[in-house]
Amino acid sequence: MSTVKIDNIWIDAEHWAEGEWRPDDEIVDVLVTLIDGSRWEATTCSFKHVQTLTSRWSRSGECLGGRYFWAKNLILVTDTSRTTIEQTILDLIENGEFECAMAKINLEPNELKNDSGSLLDS
């Protein structure tokens, strides 16, 4: 059993304007604060959004015309809802994969987000 305990899960899309978040076709940043005070980040992306992006890029020419997709600390999920993100993080902890899938960051509490809810650069 893991000794890793979650204090808070912050999802940037929860701070977007109403109607902008489409969990089944979205990419969102997640910040996990553990009880020990450490903070971890990842980008979650729905499988459908990968298709949306690569289709768009096939027309624009980006990423070799949609032939590849990458994001740092990417976790692919069926959807980006809070429920799916929470279940995913708990499963990563339970399986000892949390520290591999997430990146540890060093932010002060007042640096977590700006007025639009986006993470600030540290």
Image (spheres, grey):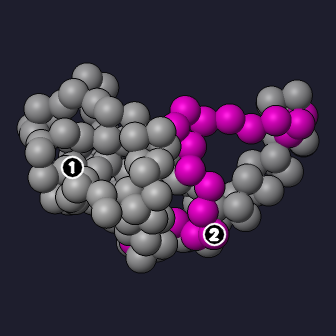
Residue 111 locus on image (x, y percent)? 16, 34
Kindly report the distance in space between the C-alpha atoms of the residues bearing marks 2 and 1.
Answer: 23 Å
Q: Position of residue 16 (x, y in %)?
A: 37, 60
- SS assignment at label 2: loop
Please provide percent x and percent y for residue 115. 21, 46
Residue type (three-letter) at the residue carrying disc 1: Thr
Q: Are marks 2 and 1 in contact (CB under 8 Å)?
A: no
Along the polypeptide, which appears first: circle 2 or circle 1?
1
- Residue 66 part of the magenta segment: yes
Q: Residue at x 23, y 55 (%)?
A: 3
Q: How far across and how far down the image is residue 46, in percent?
A: 63, 61
Seen as rendered, the residue at the extreme bottom is: 83
Q: Name the element at disc 1.
A: strand
Q: Is residue 48 visible?
A: yes
In front here: 9 or 91?
A: 91
Residue 17 seen in the current view: no
Q: Which residue, given by chain and number where applicable, does mark 1 sit on? A: 33
- Furthest residue toward front: 1
Looking at the image, residue 46 sits to the left or right of residue 102; the answer is right
Provide the residue span drawn in magenta.
65-82
Q: Amino acid at mark 2?
A: Thr
